[in-house]
């Protein structure tokens, strides 16, 4: 499927699904009046059901939104302007103007396409989150003793290294004590060991 076909399919699919959306989530909120524009629910943002008072998640995931935006950019500025605003693209009209300004003169124009010709008033406002200033931000590890939890071998590494250093430091004494202990128990290692077990009577 080409990029233009994907955008065309998206627009027609949303137009056909208007009645199903109204039957499921109730009538659309009052949108600002616009001449020759069709009011459609924005599939990139959640919607509040007035009957159940619950939010319906976006119809398109962030991955699918990004794919549509990539295909629209490949198609042209008209296809970009035909998409609704969402988390992946806040202002499609502004992005379309920038693409028109940078578009070469001999580029193909898809303005006459029927699926992109009709105007749509997308119902569902998207407000991007305001980025806090660096002074108001709370660092991730502000009140924590250590930066991160880490693996268990990382947390116990210092203790293991101290124990290993202690063993290597006294290794000569430990080897000497081991040899003396075995020499006292068995002075002649070639002599067979005498059994200390009691013999059975049969």
Image (cartoon, rainbow, N blue to C red):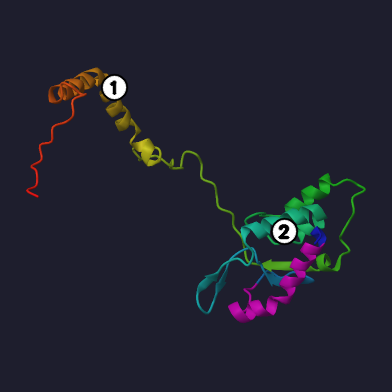
Q: Name the spot of residue 149 as percent of width and height, x first.
A: 38, 42
Residue that label 1 marks: 168
Examine the structure image and report whether residue 26 is included in the region drawn in magenta.
yes
Which badge, 1 or 2, comes first in the chain's sequence?
2
Of helix, strand and loop, which one carries label 1? Answer: helix
The residue positioned farthest toward the bottom in the image shown: 23
Q: Name the spot of residue 156 as percent of width and height, x first.
A: 33, 36
The residue positioned farthest toward the right in the image shown: 106
Q: Name the spot of residue 143 as percent of width and height, x first.
A: 35, 40
Residue 146 visible? The answer is no
Residue that label 2 marks: 68
**Does residue 51 appear to the left or right of 169 in the view shown?**
right
- Per the picture, the main secondary structure of the magenta-coloured stretch is helix
Task: Please tell me which residue is depicted at 13% across the width and 26% down the height of the picture.
Answer: 185
Residues rendered magenta in the picture: 5-30
Q: Nearer the viewer, mark 1 or mark 2?
A: 1
Q: Name the spot of residue 46 as percent of width and height, x first.
A: 58, 66
**Does residue 137 appear to the left or right of 19 in the view shown?**
left
């Amino acid at each position: 499927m080409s990029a233009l076909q994907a955008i065309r399919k998206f627009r027609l699919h949303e137009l056909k699904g208007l009645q199903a959306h109204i039957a499921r989530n109730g009538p659309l909120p009052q949108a600002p009046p616009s001449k020759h524009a069709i009011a459609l629910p924005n599939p990139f943002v959640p919607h509040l059901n007035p009957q159940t008072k619950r939010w319906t998640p976006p119809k398109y995931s962030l991955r699918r939104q990004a794919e549509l935006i990539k295909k629209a950019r490949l198609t042209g500025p008209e296809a970009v302007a035909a998409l609704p605003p969402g988390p992946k693209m806040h202002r499609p009209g502004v992005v379309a103007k920038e693409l028109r300004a940078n578009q070469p003169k001999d580029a193909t124009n898809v303005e006459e396409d029927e699926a992109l010709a009709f105007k749509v008033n997308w119902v569902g406002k998207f407000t991007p989150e305001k980025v806090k200033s660096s002074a108001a931000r709370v660092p991730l590890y502000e009140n924590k003793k250590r930066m991160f939890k880490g693996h268990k071998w990382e947390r116990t590494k210092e203790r293991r290294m101290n124990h290993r250093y202690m063993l290597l430091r006294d290794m000569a004494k430990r080897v000497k004590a081991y040899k003396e202990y075995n020499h006292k128990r068995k002075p002649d290692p070639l002599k067979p060991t005498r059994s200390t077990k009691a013999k059975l009577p049969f």
